[in-house]
C-alpha cells in the first residue's frame, strides 16, 4: 500500500481543504523520512507508536526549532493519519491520543488521566447497576476503543451475534465484558425504537452525546474519581504498552 496516496484520497473523501491535504501529506512524509521508513506496511505500522511519536516531537522542538503551533499541527496531521489507519483496521487505537501537545513555552501539555485502578473501579461500578444496561454497553464499547461518535452511529442488526460489531467498515472483536454487556442489552433492544444499536432520545432515536457524558459524570461521582471518555478509550491501549492486566472481571 502506498500510504501517502491512500491517505490523500481519504482526506479528499472527507472533504478536507486542499491546503490542509497538502500540509498533512507533508507531515506524514516528514515523519516517514525522519525514521527512514519505507512504504511497507510492517515498517510504518511498527514505528507508529507513542515512543516514536514522542521522539519525533522532541526532534521537531529541539533539533528543528519549530514553533509549538507548527509542531502541534504536525501532530494533528499524524492523528488524522491514525484515524485513517483505524478505519482500515490497521490500528486498534490512535497513539497520538497519548502524545501531549506542546505549550507556547515549549513544554508539554500534560493532561491528567485517571489511573488504571480508577478506570477498572469505574467499570465495576457500572456493572453493579442492574438497570444500566445501555450504560454498561456504552462504557465497555468505549473501553474497546470506540469513540462517542462511532457508538452513536452503530446500527441495530437483530440477526447479529454478540461476539463482534461493525463500525462503518471495521469489524471489531469485543472483549469478554463487552460481549456480555451486548448480549444483555440485546434482550432489551427489540422493544426500543429506531435503527441505531443504542436507542436514544434524539428525533431520529439516536443517542445524545450529552447522555454519554452524563453517564461518565454520574459514575465518576459514585467512585469519587474523575474518569473521562478519553480515559476509557485509552485504558486498554496504555495497558498493552505497560503490561497491566485487566482486573475488571
Image (cartoon, rainbow, N blue to C red):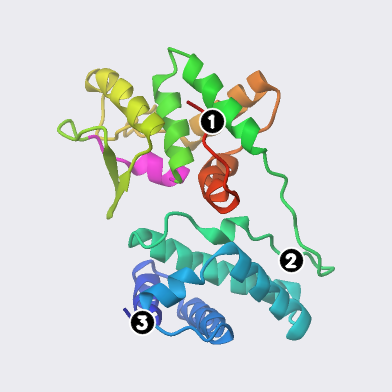
Q: Earlier in the sequence, mark 2 or mark 3?
A: 3
Q: Nearer the viewer, residue 206 or 175?
A: 175
Q: Earlier in the sequence, mark 1 or mark 3?
A: 3
16 versus 121 height, above or below: below
Tell me, yes or no, whether the two marked residues, 2 and 3, touch with CB atoms within 8 Å: no
27 versus 184 height, above or below: below
Determine the CA span between mark 2 and mark 3.
29 Å
Q: Secondary structure at mark 3?
A: helix
Q: What residue is disc 2 on?
A: 102
Q: Nearer the viewer, residue 58 or 248?
A: 248
Q: Residue placed at 48% from the left, 37% from the top? A: 209
Q: Secondary structure at mark 2?
A: loop
Where is residue 87 shown, x and y percent of the image?
Answer: 36, 59
Answer yes or no: is residue 215 visible: yes
Give the residue furthest to the top: 130
Q: What residue is disc 1 on?
A: 247
Where is residue 224 shown, x and y percent of the image?
Answer: 70, 23
Where residue 182 sits, quadrant-wise, is top left
235 relative to 38 in the view: left or right = right
Answer yes or no: is residue 65 visible: no
Where residue 186 sits, quadrant-wise, is top left
Tell me, yes or no, whether the two marked residues, 1 and 3, touch with CB atoms within 8 Å: no
Q: Which mark is residue 5?
A: 3
> 10 Å neighbourhood of mark 3: few (<14), some, or many (≥20)?
few
Determine the CA span between mark 1 and mark 3.
42 Å
75 relative to 86 in the view: left or right = right
Name the mark nearer the viewer: 2 or 1: 1
Q: Residue placed at 61% from the left, 56% from the top? A: 98
Q: Nearer the viewer, residue 32 or 80?
A: 32
Where residue 70 sits, quadrant-wise, is bottom right
Q: Range of the magenta residues?
A: 146-156
> Is residue 145 located in the magenta-colored stretch of the structure?
no
Amino acid at each position: 500500500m502506498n500510504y501517502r496516496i491512500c491517505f490523500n484520497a481519504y482526506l479528499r473523501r472527507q472533504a478536507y481543504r486542499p491546503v490542509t491535504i497538502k500540509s498533512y501529506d507533508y507531515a506524514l512524509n516528514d515523519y516517514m523520512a525522519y525514521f527512514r521508513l519505507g512504504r511497507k506496511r510492517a515498517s510504518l505500522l511498527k514505528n507508529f507508536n507513542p515512543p516514536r511519536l514522542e521522539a519525533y516531537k522532541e526532534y521537531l522542538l529541539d533539533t528543528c526549532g519549530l514553533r509549538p503551533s507548527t509542531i502541534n499541527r504536525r501532530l494533528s496531521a499524524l492523528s488524522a493519519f491514525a484515524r485513517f489507519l483505524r478505519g482500515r483496521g490497521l490500528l486498534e487505537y490512535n497513539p497520538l491520543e497519548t502524545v501531549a501537545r506542546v505549550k507556547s513555552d515549549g513544554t508539554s501539555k500534560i493532561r491528567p488521566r485517571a489511573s488504571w485502578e480508577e478506570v477498572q473501579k469505574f467499570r465495576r461500578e457500572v456493572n453493579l447497576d442492574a438497570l444500566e444496561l445501555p450504560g454498561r454497553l456504552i462504557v465497555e464499547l468505549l473501553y474497546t476503543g470506540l469513540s462517542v461518535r462511532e457508538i452513536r452511529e452503530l446500527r441495530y442488526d437483530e440477526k447479529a451475534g454478540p461476539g463482534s460489531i461493525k463500525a462503518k467498515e471495521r469489524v471489531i472483536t469485543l472483549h469478554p465484558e463487552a460481549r456480555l454487556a451486548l448480549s444483555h442489552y440485546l434482550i432489551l433492544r427489540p422493544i426500543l425504537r429506531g435503527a441505531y444499536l443504542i436507542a436514544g432520545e434524539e428525533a431520529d432515536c439516536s443517542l445524545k452525546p450529552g447522555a454519554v457524558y452524563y453517564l461518565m459524570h454520574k459514575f465518576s461521582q459514585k467512585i469519587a474519581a474523575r474518569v473521562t471518555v478519553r480515559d476509557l478509550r485509552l485504558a486498554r491501549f496504555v495497558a498493552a504498552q505497560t503490561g497491566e492486566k485487566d482486573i475488571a472481571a
